[in-house]
Image: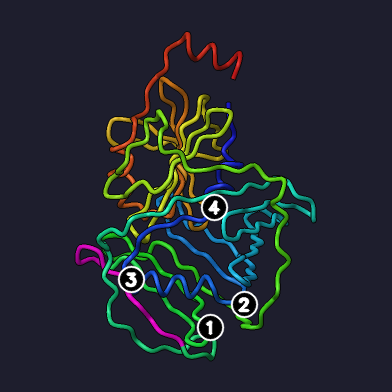
């Protein structure tokens, strides 16, 4: 049985490239290039209750360091092509990724006319993202630095799903030391992989797909704003503190954290997991286009319990 914690770290930190609408792409690129330190509150209203966390952020020269109350003193660092995970100053694991160039695609989101705002005593601008006539997100950018200081996402019915809001903001460049990725395992996108992961999932396009030496396969999907990763493993996946949830014709194990939902389920060939920032109204349609939960049978179950 494979625990999901290392997979969660991979998904959060690896850079995802997508072809967004030009205006949105420019806004997000400017935010990624901003230099600042901040404290952010993340609060999400989920079907399983409210999930919240406080995240401390330092960003400089395209690299970002985050320390979250979700994982105690756990610190994550990511930059262009890599990530590291450390606790109490010691590196636990790291990896680097080469990403393929994506051809431009027709943008799905429309960026509404911006409004001026005052945020933490600074001038800011509000942008609203519309897909298929439905408000999906409201983004607030600091005018001077371009940093994304508030992001609110909505369900299709207009209810607030998650809010990420800076409660402190210092535009001074923190000048970060680059994490050491020289000894990291390099994962490269694979163009030819035998996989159950489709090229399109519920209106989300597959960007890249990876495979490691142990047979773990994972792919990134995006519709231009929301995104998620799907993992296909040779063994079943353990998800601590999960709740069983029935969707469609299958039963999944589900867990919400601040800003992220995780589903795991068992198939006849192994285990699968989905991790993403998707609002709840998108979960069923996305999962319906992936391999469904299946009972592997008593012999395969016995083999997995004996040999993993």
Q: Check disc 4 and report its element: helix, strand or loop.
A: loop
* Quadrant showing the C terminus: top right
**Does label 2 or label 3 sit earlier along the sequence?**
3
Q: Which mark is residue 22?
A: 3
Q: Is residue 130 magenta?
A: yes
Given the current orientation, which residue lies at the most extreme right position? 89
Alpha carbon separation for disc pair 2 and 1: 8 Å
Q: Residue at label 4? A: 14
Residue 261 sits above or below residue 127 on the image: above
108 with respect to 18 (left or right): left
Q: Read off the magenta span.
A: 124-134
Q: Residue at label 1? A: 145
- Does the residue at mark 1 contact the one at mark 3 (Cβ under 8 Å)? no
Residue 76 in percent (x, y) is at 65, 56
- Does the residue at mark 1 contact the one at mark 4 (Cβ under 8 Å)? no
Q: Which mark is residue 201?
A: none
**Does label 4 or label 3 sit earlier along the sequence?**
4
Residue 29 in percent (x, y) is at 46, 71
Residue 15 in percent (x, y) is at 51, 56
**Does label 1 or label 4 sit earlier along the sequence?**
4
Counting other residues with Cα less than 10 Å from the Cα at mark 2, is it few (<14), some (14-19), or many (20 or more)? some
Residue 83 in percent (x, y) is at 62, 53
Alpha carbon separation for disc pair 4 and 3: 22 Å
Q: Residue at label 2? A: 36
């Amino acid at each position: 049985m494979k625990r999901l914690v290392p997979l969660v770290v991979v998904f959060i930190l690896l850079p995802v490239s997508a072809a967004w609408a030009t205006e949105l792409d420019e806004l997000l690129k400017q935010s990624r290039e901003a230099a600042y330190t901040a404290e952010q509150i993340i609060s999400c209203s989920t079907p399983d209750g409210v999930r919240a966390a406080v995240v401390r952020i330092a960003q400089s020269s395209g690299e970002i360091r985050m320390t979250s109350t979700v994982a105690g003193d756990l610190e994550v660092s990511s930059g262009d092509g890599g990530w590291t995970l450390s606790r109490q100053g010691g590196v636990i694991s790291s990896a680097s990724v080469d990403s393929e160039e994506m051809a431009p695609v027709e943008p799905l989101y429309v960026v509404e006319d911006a409004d001026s705002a005052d945020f933490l005593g600074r001038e800011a601008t509000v942008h609203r993202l519309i897909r298929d006539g439905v408000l999906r997100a409201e983004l607030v950018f600091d005018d001077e630095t371009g940093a994304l200081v508030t992001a609110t996402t909505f369900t299709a019915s207009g209810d607030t799903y998650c809010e990420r809001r800076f409660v402190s903001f210092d535009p001074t460049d923190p000048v970060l030391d680059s994490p050491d990725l020289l000894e990291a395992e390099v994962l490269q996108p694979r163009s030819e992989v035998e996989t159950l992961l489709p090229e399109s999932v519920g209106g989300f396009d597959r960007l890249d797909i990876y495979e490691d030496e142990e047979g773990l396969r994972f792919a990134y999907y995006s519709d231009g704003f929301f995104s998620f990763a799907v993992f296909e493993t040779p063994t079943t996946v353990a998800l601590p503190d999960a709740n069983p949830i029935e969707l469609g014709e299958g039963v999944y194990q589900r867990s919400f954290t601040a800003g992220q939902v995780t589903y795991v389920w068992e198939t006849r060939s192994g285990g699968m997991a989905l991790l993403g920032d998707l609002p709840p109204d998108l979960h069923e349609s996305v999962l319906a286009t992936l391999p469904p939960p299946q009972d592997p049978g008593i012999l395969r179950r016995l083999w997995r319990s004996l040999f993993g």
